[in-house]
Amino acid sequence: MSEEADLSNHDLYSLEANLVNKSMRELANGEEKDPITKLRLLCLSRGATGILGFGRTFRNMDDDGSKALNEEEFTNGIREMGLEVTDEEIKEMFQSFDEDGSGSVNMTEFLLKLRPPMPQCRLDIIDQAFAKMDKTGDGVITLDDLKNVYSVKEHPKYQSGEMSEDEILTDFLNNFEGGRGNLDGKITKEEFENYYATISASIDNDMFFDLIMRRAYAL
């Protein structure tokens, strides 16, 4: 196995396309769904960064830094994401996440519940990949971390002169940040896990998920 990871992630792009199609089919099948399941499917129908982008939208609304959202902020977040749900469904969603009836939702717990559940073996391999990338051990993956882990010399766009090393690595980081939010070039462990939890939802077999992660990150 190569010591360098594969930054092209072709397998993941294919899995993401399957995930989007599967989620859209489930949304359209007419079956009654609980609010959390519906919200999860709506996010998954936007691809691997659907839930991640959702989290960033909510964090941008957390003006007081409380890491909690009241019902109005929660409603505004759903609306800003452009999800097709009724006011009544939003209210049901909020009440589902506000388990203690406090009138607010903890964002970390909210995202943990929203993302597709994963067995421990998948969480473990995701953690290994993150630890390999986070060379400085500060809990955040940056461009400098990647330069210490990856060589882009074999990347087709580097060889053709189409992209520089920094451009390829920045593009890789941006994959985890979604189309929304501030592309700050910093990936937290939570964001990394949320991204791969979404990819995980399109893979039924634990061993296949493990193989994809090991191949992508040369673990």
Image: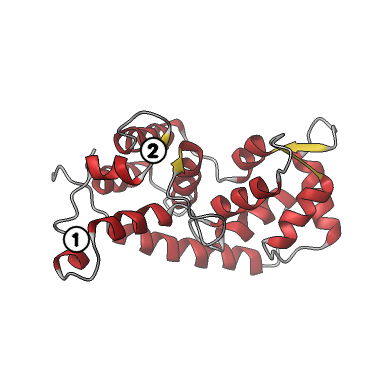
Label number found at residue 126: 2
In the structure shown, which secondary structural element does the residue marked by tag 1 occupy? loop
Q: Quadrant of the N terminus?
A: top left
Report the side of 111 relative to 94 (left or right).
left
Colour scheme of the picture = secondary structure
Question: Is 130 placed left or right of 87 in the picture?
Answer: left
The amino acid on which the numbered mark 2 sits, given as a three-letter code, is: Ile
Q: Nearer the viewer, mark 1 or mark 2?
A: 1
Q: Is residue 13 left or right of residue 159?
A: right
Amino acid type at image mark 1: His
Q: Residue at x 39, y 31 (%)?
A: 124
Q: Nearer the viewer, residue 71 or 187?
A: 187
- x 57%, y 56%: residue: 181
User: Residue 169 sits in which quadrant?
Assistant: bottom left
Residue 9 visible somewhere in the drawing: no
Residue at point 16% right, 71% down? Answer: 160
Q: Is residue 173 above or below residue 162?
A: above
Of pointers 1 and 2, the one earlier in the residue sequence: 2
Residue, disc 1 = 155
| Residue 96 screen position, x and y as percent | 77, 42
Residue 45 in picture, x, y percent from top left: 56, 63
Q: How many marks?
A: 2
Can you give x and y, in whole percent of width and height, for residue 113 in the image?
63, 40
Give above or below for 151 relative to 108: below
